[in-house]
Amino acid sequence: DAGVIQSPRHEVTEMGQEVTLRCKPISGHDYLFWYRQTMMRGLELLIYFNNNVPIDDSGMPEDRFSAKMPNASFSTLKIQPSEPRDSAVYFCASSLDRAHEQYFGPGTRLTVT
Amino acid sequence: EDQVTQSPEALRLQEGESSSLNCSYTVSGLRGLFWYRQDPGKGPEFLFTLYSAGEEKEKERLKATLTKKESFLHITAPKPEDSATYLCAVQAVIQGAQKLVFGQGTRLTINP
């Protein structure tokens, strides 16, 4: 398996623009997670899905952030409108079930100017 | 408040100099403790899972141990390629939801 795939790897955008991050989980994994990593706050869970259904979105910072999982092999995290404070590395991870280890993708480095 | 604290924040060792990294946690309803390695510009890479006090896991030069309040990652005779940030994460029930809470990490540098 190729592991968790994320795109783009780098994104530079201007404040106010819409940003869409993409993720393909490991085949057969029922859980998908979106995290954000910054120097100040470390790794933070934003939202996770089980069998394509959002289970816990309490980590989503505000209404500008939304996530979808239309099928078992694809998820998106959208920020609209983007702000400079959204600059961070966004990771997608997947796991077989809630108790097992999570496997992380390479991340998307987002810079909002 | 549920917390995961790692120490030290950074550690420099000479090649071959053994040491330990610490992860202490104050969570209720522990469901597992995970160790990850993260290289610059990459996602965290899974190393170990520990579920109960007294449990130990080993992989090459690394050994992870778990007590009721903390976990240690022991590194024996490290090599420069062991340089990375090591992250500890605790799977716990927080406000009714099962979540993985990460510590801030220990940045390990092994000098040749």
Image (cartoon, helix red, strand yellow):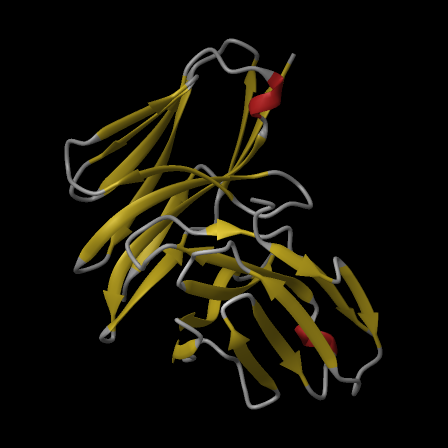
Residue found at x 72% / y 88%: A81
Left-right relation of A78 to A61: right
Location of the C terminus of chain A by quadrant is bottom right
Residue A40 placement (x, y as % from top left): 57, 60
Left-right relation of A17 to A100: right
Residue found at x 28% / y 62%: B2
Q: Is residue A28 above or below residue A45?
A: above
Count of labels in the image: 0
Task: Report which quarter residue B60 is drawn in.
Answer: top left
> Closer to the camera, A51 or A106?
A51
Q: Is residue A16 above or below residue A52?
A: below
Task: Report which quarter residue B98 is drawn in.
Answer: bottom left
Residue B41 placement (x, y as % from top left): 69, 46
Residue B19 placement (x, y as % from top left): 41, 20
Q: Is residue A21 above or below residue B92?
A: below
Residue B32 placement (x, y as % from top left): 25, 48
Q: Is residue B107 above or below residue A51?
A: above
